[in-house]
Image (cartoon, grey):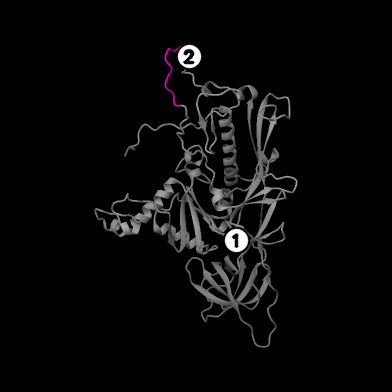
Amino acid sequence: MASALLNSPTYALQPAPEQVALQTNYITSFNFLNQYLPDTYEKEFERYGNRTVSSFLRMVGAEMPSNSDQIKWAEQGRLHIKYTSCTSAAALGASTATFTVADSGVTYIAIRIGQTVMIQNNTSGVFNKAIVTAVPSATTFTVAYYETAGQAFAVSTACTVFIYGSEFKKGTNGMVGSLEGEDDIYSNSPIIIKDKYAVNGSDMAQIGWVEVTTENGATGYLWYLKSEHETRLRFEDYLETAMIEAVPAASSSGALTAGYKGSEGIFYVVNNRGNVWGGGTPTALSDWDTIVARLDKQGSIEENVVFVNRGLSFDIDNMLATLNGYAVSGAANAASYGLFDNDINMALNLGFSGFRRGYDFYKSDWKYLNDPTMRGGLNATASTATGTITGLLVPAGSTSVYDQIMGKNAKRPFLHVRYRASEAEDRRYKTWITGSAGGAATSDLDAMEVNFLSERCVCTLGANNFVLFRYG
């Protein structure tokens, strides 16, 4: 069926922020030779509303200084031990067996003599319980089964093994060996972000006839002020979007060869260490049940904020609306005023700010994912390696981590920005003016140059508690 929305107006993707005079930068239909002056609106019309896209990190994170070129932190590993790729060298019905552990990254197993284990066939689900009687090598262990029937599966069957306790005979020595707590060490490096605005001294002395304004409230008849403020706003947006989109320079990449290192942005970290929903938008309650089941296996954070694009926002609203008794029953007036907190004389509110399903989920529209000049202009159903992102679930609150620089445990928000700073230099947000115009007197250049700089990176703690919603 053809869309009912016709005559789609275009949006300016490149509003000519060049440093030179362009034909498109001037109004050319005004002719002083006309005998009649045109009626003009003095104030510039803000047809795109608030054009900035930053606000995400201000809502969920914090900023704190760092005096190092690298930020490192440790995150807790699992408390209990489980291996999912184990095979037995014994046959069906054997009373004892030797297992080989082939889990990825495992070079030394943490199974000791005297421990009791549960062993389950990964395919059929049948299981045994056994006691460890020997550990012949770094990746093998021998068990004696408790069941009379012995091993419940055939030789070389893939199994999962986890430890549930131990048993020792009377008058024997204690457990051999000990287990040390294991941490996962993560790090990130700040990147330097720069921008600049320049205007020559002659243009600064000219007053325009259209009143201009910007999102930060600056108004006036001086065009260069508008451009300077827009450069500042654009730079502030980049401070956030760089933290979201940054990727580290891969080995042998062109960027690394050229001397650029990159950084680990939020999307990169969650794609690699977090949870990913590859179906675009979860549209049914059963989809969210799957997400809840995954969160149960991770940190089980009670409160979470889901930052969504318009499509995912509507899908959540529609899903919750169908749970309304009137809507499900198919009644002609499918509006439950009590459930939706609407009076009969009020406009019906079909939007939801959140819901609870095992955990609390608060929904918030993310302008960055809707803006057509940013991610909102990407293909809605792309199936590339990362795909089009429709939302991000962020755990609320803070977590305790071991800060390698401070040398102690510290409370940190799950998402926060670290910027370079010391007693002599603060690089959180630097701005300075050079040239010989606009009050500057640093060179003989007949212009004012406004410089912007920041050096920062984002730390995504506990990425296993995040969920990225995307296509592909």
Residue 203 visible in the shown view: yes
Residue 151 visible in the shown view: no
Up/down of 298 relative to 164, above or below: above
Disc 2 marks which residue? 32
Residues 300 and 305: in front is 305
Report the magenta residues as a range.
31-41
Residues 278 and 333: in front is 333
The 10 Å Cα crowd at callout 2, few under 14, some 14 to 19, many 20 or more, is few
Image x and y of residue 90, in percent: 58, 72
Q: Please state which of the two labelled residues, at mark 2 or mark 1, is closer to the viewer.
A: 2
Disc 1 marks which residue? 399
Image x and y of residue 459, in percent: 62, 52
Q: Residue furthest bottom?
A: 171
Amino acid under label 2? Answer: Phe
Amino acid under label 1? Answer: Thr
Whole-angstrom CA distance, mark 2 to mark 1, is 66 Å
Label the magenta part by its dominant secondary structure.
loop
